[in-house]
Image (cartoon, rainbow, N blue to C red):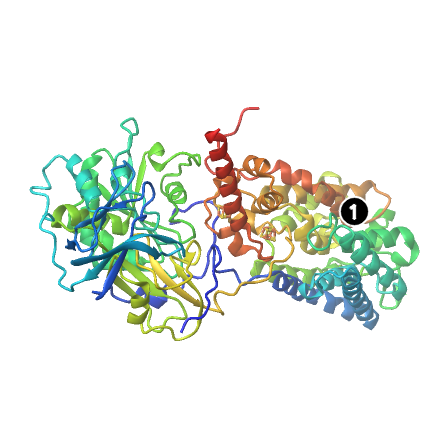
Amino acid sequence: MERLLVVSSSPHIHSPLDTQKVMGWVLAALAPAGLAGVYFFGVRAAAVMAVCVASCVIFEYLWEKCLKKPSTVNDLSAAVTGLLLAYNLPPTIPFWMAVLGSLFAMVVVKHLFGGLGCNIVNPALAARAMMLTSWPVPMTTWTIDGVSGPTPLALIKMGATDQLPPLQDLFIGHVGGCIGETSALALLIGFGILLYKDIIKWHIPVVYVATVAVLSVAFQRPVTPLYEILSGGLLLGAIFMATDYVTTPVTRRGQIIFAVGCGVLATLIRTWGGYPEGVSYSILIMNLVVPLIDRATKPHIFGEVKKHA
Amino acid sequence: MKLPTFWGGIHPPQNKVLTADEKIEQYLPKGELVFPMPQNIGAPCAPVVAKGDRVLVGTRLGNNDAFVSAPILSSVSGTVKDVTLRMTTPGTFENCVVVENDGKYEKAPEWQPLPDYENIDPKEYLKRIRDAGIVGFGGATFPTAVKLSPPPDKKIKWLIVNGVECEPYLNCDNRLMLESPDEVVNGLKLVLRLFPEAQGVIAIENNKPEAVKTMEEAVKRLGASGITVQPLAVKYPQGAEKMLIEALTGQEYVVTALPADVGCIILNVRTTQQIYRAIALGEPAVTRVVTVTGDAVAHPKNISVPLGTSVRELVELCGGFKEQPVKILSGGPMMGVSMRSIDVPVVKGTSGILALTAKSAMLKPITACLHCGKCVEACPMGLVPTVLEPLVAARMYKRFEEEGGMNCIECGSCTYVCPAHRPLTQGCRDGKASVMAMRRKAAAK
Ligand code: SF4
Ligand code: SF4
């Protein structure tokens, strides 16, 4: 009756959550923000998303094919990077720029560092930073309802707080900005999905946003803390990019330090930096110190007393 | 009220329903029984019978006079057929005494209750516990008489009966508490005579509310004043000694220390019951309860079997396999040992036989670590498995030790949660074994 039995060492059962499912749920959680983007910015936004996702997946596929490595496109992480990159671009971005951004994200940031799990910074954010430096004008041209104009954060920077859109527009996403960052409502739904499915814990997003809120008061920013939180890419960054497994600390304490650091840097850049927005740079800079944070926040080993140096 | 528990840990699916309501069934085998000589932690036994000898239930088959050892007794009456190498659970061949069962189950005359056992010097219990072959029946098989003889400078404050049974699928301890609560409580009462200053605690995870209730009633009925029943929040690996002590007393201790160093002694439910039976009823510890279960088994059951019975007979008693098993385990799915064959005998450490189909035992491809931190969150020992595994792969054993790798209790929690299916527990196990081997080599020089 019994044929050859599998012999392996324990444990013998496994949680159903695997990499592909994790990435699948991240995509699902990103979906509401994508729909909001298409709703407010039109089909052009959908086209940008399609271009970014397709090129990220194709570049990863080709790269691994050329290097004769096993293909990892099925783990869906390339699709997640593509979608996140699209969410960080203006809806009017020329397609060829989006393609080059995807190439940079996949090949330079992800695969030259060794592929999934080995990259040091978030590929989508690094690509966005590269694009912002290379093509500053198309990367900061915002249109809403067919007219272009500055984003709320730019208005704050210019001191033109009297022209700011009302808070409820900010909440539902009816303002100029990147494709996936404007609708707080859609992003919060995504946050709910990630929490419910236990893909991420609440610590990083909540601490990050809370730090920004507190500092916006401390730095006497001209808008209320709630307005500060809902403007720009903070929610997108806090929920989806500062929680990227690969580029954030592994311990809970480390994650909290990381989130506080992001909050401080983002507010500093928003207040005193050259750009109106500081979320991407704050996360990129904190990505770089993750190895240090990990080393400094090792968990307490059971039963071990602190050693004297 | 929030129930006590420990830091870290995981919540694997319980799968206990398969056998939770199955009454323990007595099974009396026919034919030959096989008794491997190594059956406990410590010194393995050597055969003390020869081919052709007549043996009775409770006759000593193997013995070792070393302090850390426990004799092996026959579970049936019959004739010694052979003393030879036979395959055992992990797939290795060991020296075994083979007894041809005469089916009479005649008990050796020396097995009588200890006279006036409730009033004699409790030190006499220790000899009986050893002679009865009692070891930790939870699976660790540490000789119980040794455990109950801590160095005199260790003050024992807690005597803990481990009814946690945190491994998924298994129900033998649960059923025992439901069916023989008085014997368990009486066993604990006897042990408490050895440690009059200790408090008795019966620890049970809260997924067994009936067992909690039954034990509470038994404690009340038997007027056991120094004993409490403590329900615990459900979490794996709560049955591990360190985690159980943390949950109950909030104490931690270094990996090289023993529970006695923090004033605790932990006994398995079955072990406690066997102590009572050996002392009060004059019964040697020659049977154990085995949960035979898994989605490949036709009729999963809890069976009381004489040690030495072939695992194949137990599977047949459960109606055989209804589906093709790909993996058969001795013990639970988290820490059990996978078997090459079911033609091996039940030993003192066999807590369950678990036959899994391809669906539930699927081996998944290993992919790159995502740095997600789930393993760190799961590790009850506060280790960082994602760092340890690559260190072992790179043979950096010194760094492995520095990062606390030797603290790993091989509970499997990290591997269970890893979305990349990294062999984290396996890495730590290899790392520990290599470090131990190096230490032995260094000591031999
Ligand atoms: S590292 Fe060891 S102790 Fe920690 S979870 Fe993994 S197996 Fe358990
Ligand atoms: S659980 Fe697995 S993927 Fe996550 S950090 Fe640990 S080893 Fe890496």
Residue B66 relative to residue B122: left or right: right
Q: Is mark 1 on a helix, strand or loop?
A: helix
Q: Residue B403: percent from the left, percent from the top? A: 56, 37
Observer-nearest residue: B126 or B23? B126
Of residues B344 and B299, the one nearer the viewer is: B344
B186 versus A193 height, above or below: above
In this rendering, the answer to whether B26 lies above or below B217 is below
Expressed as whole percent of the image width and height from the top left, the position of residue B139 reads 34, 51
Residue A148 quadrant? bottom right
Q: Is residue B418 left or right of residue B281?
A: right
A294 relative position to B338: left or right = right
The residue depicted at 46 percent of the width and 67 percent of the height is A4
Outermost residue, left side: B116
Q: Nearer the viewer, residue A308 or B57?
A: B57
Residue that carries the numbered disc 1 in the rendered image? A281
In the rendering, at what x and y percent does residue B36 appear? 30, 52
Badge 1: how crowded within 10 Å, few (<14), some, or many (20+)? some
The answer to whether residue A232 of the structure is visible from this angle is no
Place residue B193 in its image quadrant: top left
Label count reads 1
Residue A270: x and y in percent read 80, 45
- Which residue is rendered at x = 75% and y = 39% of the image? A219
Residue B168 seen anywhere in this rendered image of the structure:
yes
Q: Kindly identify the residue that appears in the image at 91 percent across and 59 percent down.
A: A138
Q: Which amino acid does label 1 sit on?
A: Tyr
Disc 1: host chain: A
Q: Nearer the viewer, residue A144 or A94?
A: A94
